[in-house]
Amino acid sequence: MTGSNDGYLTLLDENRIEFPPTRRALRDPNGLLAIGGKLTPAWLLAAYRRGIFPWYSDDQPILWWSPSPRCVVIPELFRIGRSLRKELRRGHFRVTFDQAFDQVIEACRAPRADAEGTWITDEMQAAYEEMHRLGHAHSVEVWRDGRLAGGLYGIALGRVFFGESMFHRETDASKVAFVHLVRQLELWGCPLIDCQVSNPHLASLGAVEVSREDFERLLEAGIRQPPFPQPWKMSWSYE
């Protein structure tokens, strides 16, 4: 265990699934908590229940994070912007759940013009595809003329959804995916969508920042609730 910036970086024992208290996370880099462990479903589920997620690149070991503030969306407070309402009214896109998870995560890890490389490593992709097969990971697909135009994926525990990544191949496609996700989860009684770390795109979609303490309080209440219905089916539509 090493310490700096008023926090501690913990080396995890691969033979025992145990994370340190999130209050020990480093302030710089914000939220780095632990190193090591595995990306098995058991490790991932234990992490998400604590509000911890993996994020690292190919040349790094597995790094686990719990940043503060935390970027979240509260579905009942979510509002759709004017320009996006116009796009939804046009009805150009068809939206589905869990119809092309592997294609969505593959598209999310593709190189982007505004970033170098990808944090979705081969190991990470395989782990989340396994989580999908087990019913813990879900995707939202946006289609136009039979082609995948955008989408997103994440993890569901109880009535909480943890967003991982999104992509678009056509303008507004990822936003359409996000709106349908939020509204459908709201119908299912979801109190919290975790977006991890804020950025301008998420802020434009209504995401806000809360303290780690407030996030964990909402998280604990949400994951105690019964899980979302299975299989996931889209019933919300913009009218």
Image (cartoon, rainbow, N blue to C red):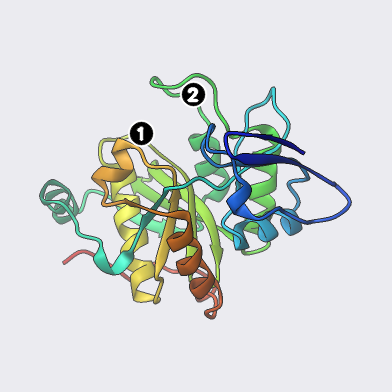
Q: Nearer the viewer, mark 1 or mark 2?
A: 2
The location of residue 84, given as percent across then percent down, is 17, 49
The location of residue 45, given as percent across then percent down, is 67, 60
Under mark 2, the amino acid is Pro
Give the alpha-carbon distance from disc 1 to disc 2, as whole Å: 12 Å
Q: Quadrant of residue 74?
A: bottom left
Under mark 1, the amino acid is Arg
Under tag 1, what secondary structure?
Answer: loop
Quick one: which residue is furthest to the bottom in this view? 226
Quick one: which residue is furthest to the right in this view? 15
> At 65% from the left edge and 55% from the top edge, which residue is drawn?
21
> At 42% from the left edge and 51% from the top edge, which residue is drawn?
141
- Which part of the image, by quadrant, shows the N terminus? top right
- Which part of the image, by quadrant, shows the C terminus? bottom left
Q: 73 and 40: which one is in front? A: 73
User: With respect to residue 229, does 200 lie above or below?
Assistant: above
Under tag 2, what secondary structure?
Answer: loop
The location of residue 131, given as percent across then percent down, is 66, 56
Q: 53 and 92: which one is in front? A: 53
Could you tell me if the residues under marks 1 and 2 are in contact, i.e. CB atoms within 8 Å?
no
The earlier-in-sequence mark between 1 and 2 is 2
Q: What crowding class fits label 1: few (fewer than 14 Cα within 10 Å), some (14-19), or many (20 or more)?
A: some
Q: What crowding class fits label 2: few (fewer than 14 Cα within 10 Å), some (14-19), or many (20 or more)?
A: few
The answer to whether any part of residue 228 appears in the image is no
Q: Quadrant of residue 121?
A: top right
The answer to whether any part of residue 206 appears in the image is yes
Q: Is residue 86 left or right of residue 175?
A: left
Quick one: which residue is furthest to the front in this view? 6
> At 69% from the left edge and 60% from the top edge, which residue is drawn?
46
User: With respect to residue 199, does 97 lie above or below?
Assistant: below
Residue denoted by label 1: 169
Residue denoted by label 2: 111
